Image (spheres, coloured by chain):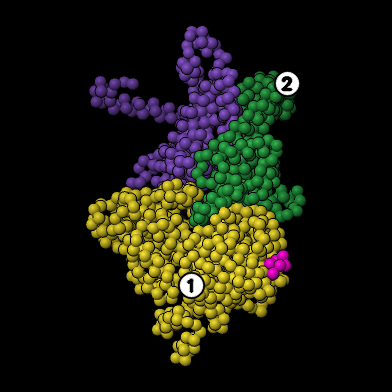
Amino acid sequence: MLSGRTLSTRAASLLLTLWLVSVLVFLAGQVLPGDVGRVMLGPFADAQAVAALNKQLGADQPLLVQYWRWFSAALTGDFGTSLSMRAPVAPFVLQSLGRSAALAGIILLFLVPAGVGAGIVAGLNQGRLADRLIVLTGISFGIVPDFVSGLLLLMVFGLWLNWFPITGAAPDGAGFWTSGYYLILPALPLVLNLTGYLARMTRAGVVEALAADYTRTATLKGLDRSQVILRHVLPNALTPTIAVLATQSGYMLGGLVVIEALFGIQGLGNLVLNAAKSRDFPMLEAGVLVMATIFVLSAAAGDLIQALLDPRQRRRASL
Amino acid sequence: MTKRTDIDALRNLSGDIWNVAVDEYAQGFLRRRDLLKYAALIGLTGFAASQGLSFSGTARAAAGGGTVRVGLGQPTKAIDPVTLTDPASIGVISQVGEYLILDDPKDGLQPKLAVSWEADETAKRWTFKLRPGVKFHDGRTVTAKDVVASFERLVDPNSGSSALSAYKGILSKGGAKVVDDETVAFDLDQSNSNFPFYVSSDVYNAVILPADYAGDFEKTFNGTGPFKLESFRPKQGASFVRNPDYWGDKSLPDRVEIKFFDDEQAQVVALQAGQLDVIPSTTRLELAIDGNPNFKLLTVQASSHDPVHLRTDQPPFTDKRIRRALALTLDREAIVKGLLKGRAVVGNDSPFAPIFPSADPSVPQRKQDIAEAKRLLAEAGVPNGFEVTLTTERAYDIPDYAVIIQNFAKKAGIDIKLNVLPQDAYYGSATFGSSPWLDSNLGITDFGHRGTPDIFLNATLKSTGAWNAAHFKNPDYDTLLVDYGKARDLQAQRLAAGKIQALLLDETPEIISYFSQYTRISSTKVEGVRFTAISHLLLDRVTFVQA
Amino acid sequence: MMDLLEFPAPARASSILRLAGRLGRAIRGLPLSVIVGSLILLFWIACALFGDRLVPFDPYGEDFLATLAPPDATHWFGTDQLGRDIFSRIIVGSRDILLVAPLATLGGVASGTIIGLVLGYFDGLVDAVGARLLDTLMAFPFIVLVTMTLVALGPSNVTVILVIAIAYAPLVARTVRAAVREQREREYVSAARLGGENAFAIMVLEILPNIRETILIELVTRLGYAFFSIATLSFLGLGIQPPSADWGLAVADGYGFLTGGKWWGVVFNSAAIVSLVMATNLIAQGVGAFENVDR
């Protein structure tokens, strides 16, 4: 199962995917018109000045050369200098990763108990009012776009009620708990969005587990209901949860562009989007690669955990 | 001030050029304020000051102290006066950097690091006397060498300066010269009576920096301004403290705290929560504070406008009657009131905004006339109208403006389809052939404020202009433009301007239906916030109102 | 079906009644969620088709005297920043999203199915490389992908359809691939192979019909998400062009006025989006889309 060979094959395919992603970014650069000099100096600047700036930044070389230079440096761990910020890329990327990770952490903190809890309740009461209510509420919250709920939450809870700060960026030197407090409001839109989805996944797992042979056997054996649930139903209900979390983590760490902008969190999503807009090639590569790595790693982790938990499903879940 | 003796006294202040202006003033064609501004322009700064044109702001002996909290947008790149382009960076640099001259929206040209200036008879050589005893924040004294180096940097084609296009044809490498420690001379490429504007805050890159400046502004923020750097966090904000060695009146506030916002809404929320004292404003944001007694709107009339260019070299706008027809469908007053909520003045299809003294106010204002539009279309052979695509950028109120134009044009049978691109896609690489801005048949662009119309007249409408989206190649216009440039006095300028305005009305290569105001929102608890229409933010005279 | 023309006239009437009866019984047999969802969907489809004839105001005509007017007796949902009636615009705005979303979903599901079939059926190099490419596409940030496509192709309905299709294809492919892998071990496949059918025929004629349910579920679920994504894209300025009354675009327009207390633009248009996604989800739930979860 966890043989050395499987692991090394896995690792190899991981690296291959990452390399392909970096190539995709390079291709993107080919497709996107405009260059960093023009973006930095604006449309009204003289073409000569733009050319001079491009030369200074090394952006006048053909993109393939730029890619090659970046790639060979990256292999040694040097991710280069940001073209628009004129400073090393690595600190920017790492710091923004940290901030996005903190936000993702707070999201999960609320999401997992709420989603799994609701899913279990729904699954155990299948067909009844509680079940229908939970599913319906989950769906309703799940489809309000995060930019709408984000601003409404900000206005209601941040501005009018003053229960939460109106920014997600805690002041310098703030402690662990304070920083977490600042991230509650920005986390809420996503919690609302995903709870329904997670609940439905968990619910499906619970329903399937309840109907399974081993559950009936356990009940017949005389095990009391709560024991049955705890020992047999729950573990099996959690497998879809893991799958969900695995696929959503990538999104949480790089896709929250609007929330990050609204709450002033200098996260990874913002960083990558601005790098794309500014044609800041080194920053874009580094940022996208970090996002891709996280996505691939968490997908792989999700698959592995699923395989560990349920050998029967292994074949179906593998990729 | 119209007594005979006073006028004679005025005349003695300077030569013929000045006297033409005095004549105008005596005959009532020139307002007192404009006369004083003109005096400043040609170097009579002492006189202008004595007449009440304040040069150091309203220096109240009020309680100083406190921290001014400012919200700005997000700087688009590393902050550096040489490559400066965006409003947020300009706002930051205004705290620490200064110019030879400040172009104040109310009071015109104000001596800052230069105390006086004058041109020779050809207006090709301008000499500036520097203010003595000015120090950079690092302690060194400002000398002519630093000033010359600052300008050499801006006009050097290899420095990647965003001001290169501003100085094209005016000042080249080697043009700025040291005369002595406190005097700088500029030998221009051609005569220019408006040159003081070119070394003023109007060219926001023209901050005076040390001669050995190496492009690392974010490390030191070393300038001559009333505030100096306390701390800077890229993408998050900056804070500045009073400069105790400032050459002028020391700043009233102790500190300035600037916070960068990626999102406008977050900025407004912060203002409403009482966490900010002043933020930039837009039509939408004004609504957020409308009627709220805790906030007020600060405005400055500017020459910023959104020209609608019509390509003259290919269908459907080759015939100038068709161009005029489109211009005649617009109800400009309605646009100013409805779209801009009155924060603008009506435009007459030329870059000569009413705030420019050289603008000729006698040129008749174009008004909506659907019947005439239809008649012109019929005359030009398209009585049932035609179809055309309007390409523009998603920025500010421009998409709404496009929809409004679409609706007006329908009345004459012109069917406009909209293509609204993201801003960078609209500008493309900003060169002919690879830029929707410069290649489209019909488009809307946005131009910020300038102190004189020169750059618009040259870059957008001259045959060889780099921003000539209308592909307007009219030899008469080019000739008139040369006349305008040569004009030495206000009257001659106005005459030439009037001719240009009339020609543009006839040819209509672009539609300019308004010149907007530049606005900021501030809390009612602060007084004395000053700013230019180019996004400079001057906070050294800010005081806090005791409740 | 009976050939109605063969029957005498009175009999025709009664046979129609019988048909109606059959239909009614079939409908009553459907779960409530499907009925409600379908009604909502039908309502919006009707708006898209006939709305422009029934709206009280011209959805595209501005009125400078009534900009940002709150909801009242004349303008039930208030007006937007150009004075246009929001109620009328919402009715007419259903057109774009109802056109673009199904096409985008169809594109994504169709291409995803093809890819999933191929990758699921073939092992070895094809699968290895294909899976890697899919991973790459999924790992690539959606926002950057959208920005790139937008800049390359310009904003338009076509761009939106393409971007959504590209984003959904890998996800669909994943599910289809897993389903195909399961089917691959079944007897009828080995029988077909023994019978000499070529790979293409096996994939399309044998396996595809058997995974029909999976595909249908993907289609309906993805449609719900498509409505959501398209609204987000319009909000980010990456899709449908003004002066379209598209709901996402309207939310984007009204967004800047929320802090000024002008909530009606955002709220009513968001409610419209929510209702449509809800309708699709209800239908999806009704056909059991959320029962067999196999991710």
The picture places residue B360, in percent across and down from the top left corner, at: 38, 72
The purple chain is: C
Task: Between residue A295 and residue B150, name the one nearer to us.
Answer: B150
How many angstroms separate mark 2 from mark 1 (CA)?
A: 85 Å
Q: Which mark is residue B123?
A: 1
The picture places residue B140, in percent across and down from the top left corner, at: 71, 67
Q: Which class describes the residues within 10 Å of circle 1: few (<14), some (14-19), or many (20+)?
A: some
Q: Is residue A121 rendered to the left or right of residue B354?
A: right
The answer to whether residue C241 is seen in the rendering is: yes
Q: Which mark is residue B422?
A: none
At mark 1, the secondary structure is loop
- State the quadrant of the C terminus of chain B: bottom right
Q: Disc 2, disc 1: CB below 8 Å? A: no
Task: Between residue C120 and residue B471, name the one nearer to us.
Answer: B471
- Residue pictured at 64% horizontal, 53% vertical: B235
Give amino acid for label 2: Ser
Q: Is residue B140 magenta?
A: yes
Please state the chain letter of the residue tagged with numbered disc 2 in the rendered image: A
Seen in the picture, residue B129 relative to B445 is either above or below; the reply is below
What range of the chain is rendered magenta? B135-141
Foreground: disc 2 or disc 1: 1
Colour of the chain lettered A: green
Quadrant hosting residue B342: bottom left
Q: Is residue A119 rendered to the left or right of residue B198?
A: right
Seen in the picture, residue C192 relative to B339 is either above or below; the reply is above
Which secondary structure type mostly characterizes the magenta part of the structure?
A: loop
Q: Which residue in the structure is indicated by mark 2? A: A3
Quadrant hosting residue C293: top right
The yellow chain is: B
